[in-house]
Structures are given as structure tokens and as C-alpha cells.
């Protein structure tokens, strides 16, 4: 049993409301229990919502809205779910300011990627949960 970024399973959770499906994740779901989570929705944000990026110690949308507290609250809720089910691994959507495990956008809203982790992924890793990027499957 693993946690999984809900958007990878085709659930309507992405910031832009676009439905995506990761075929490798869907294939894995045929043989393993994947618990879908969206830290941003669990933190109280709607879908669709402003495009967020991490800028310093804050998460801001392209429109300038500070959504840091919602991101932190959502990360805590994901951690609660992980502890409830004794989760040891999580498949997370790379590049996301919540779920990114190896790369995130640099905060300039220009599409530039940098090494880094999203808010939820960082908290999960700090609590001993192995992160698996959807890019690594």
C-alpha cells in the first residue's frame, strides 16, 4: 500500500483543472493499493486554483495570492493519512510545489525547474516515508 498523488490517477485535483493520467501509475494500481491524496485540496484549496510556486519560504500563486498555510495544512493532512495506514512509500507528482520529489519550479513562473521538494513531499520524507517520483516509475 502506497500514497499516490491523486492527479496521477486521473482525479480532478490539478491546479488548472486539467485531467491527466499517468499510465505507469494506473498500471501499478491494478496490482497494488494506492491511496490517492491531494495536499492542496486537503489544505482547503479549490480546483481549479491559481498556479502556485514556492518562492523562498512561501507558496504564492502567479496572481500573488499567498497559499502557504493551505499548503502546510494539506501536507499535515497527508502525513496523518500516511500514519493512519502505516504508509512507508509515496508516489508523488514531480514538479508540483506540494508533491515534487526531485524537481520543482523555481518561483519565477517561467517554467524553469530546480532541484527541490514540494511542501508535502518534504514533510513525508522528514517522517521516514520513501518518495517515488512519477518520473522514476
Image (spheres, helix red, strand yellow):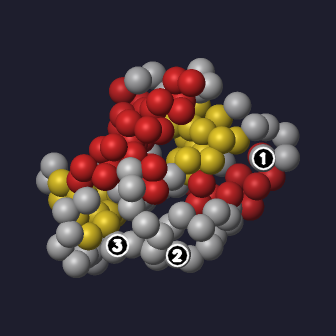
* Residue positioned 68% across, 58% down in the render: 9
* Residue positioned 77% across, 46% down in the render: 28
Tell me if 29 is positioned left or right of 83 in this view.
right
Q: Position of residue 136 (x, y in %)?
A: 59, 48
Which callout, 3 or 2, points at the residue further toward the start of the chain?
2
Q: Which residue is mark 1?
A: 29
Assign a secondary structure to mark 1. loop
* Residue positioned 38% across, 36% down in the render: 76
Q: Which residue is mark 3?
A: 51
Which residue lies most toward the left here?
A: 56
Q: Disc 1 to disc 3, how far (Cα)? A: 28 Å
| Disc number placed over residue 110 in the picture, else none | none
- Above or below, comparing residue 15 to residue 134 in the picture: below
Q: Position of residue 17 (x, y in %)?
A: 52, 75
The crowd level at tag 3 (other Cα within 10 Å; few <14, some 14-19, many 20+) is: some
Q: Which residue is mark 2?
A: 17
Amino acid at each position: 500500500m502506497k500514497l499516490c498523488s491523486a492527479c496521477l490517477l486521473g482525479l480532478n485535483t490539478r491546479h488548472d483543472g486539467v485531467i491527466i493520467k499517468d499510465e505507469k501509475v494506473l498500471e501499478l494500481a491494478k496490482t497494488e493499493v494506492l491511496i490517492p491524496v491531494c495536499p492542496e485540496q486537503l489544505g482547503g484549496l479549490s480546483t481549479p486554483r491559481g498556479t502556485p510556486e514556492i518562492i523562498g519560504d512561501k507558496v504564492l500563486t502567479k496572481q500573488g495570492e499567498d497559499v502557504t498555510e493551505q499548503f502546510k495544512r494539506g501536507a499535515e493532512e497527508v502525513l496523518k493519512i500516511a500514519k493512519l495506514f502505516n504508509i512507508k512509500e509515496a508516489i508523488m507528482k514531480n514538479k508540483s510545489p506540494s508533491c515534487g520529489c526531485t524537481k520543482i519550479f523555481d518561483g519565477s513562473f517561467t517554467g524553469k525547474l530546480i532541484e527541490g521538494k514540494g511542501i508535502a513531499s518534504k514533510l513525508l520524507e522528514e517522517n521516514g516515508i520513501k518518495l517515488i517520483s512519477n518520473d522514476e516509475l
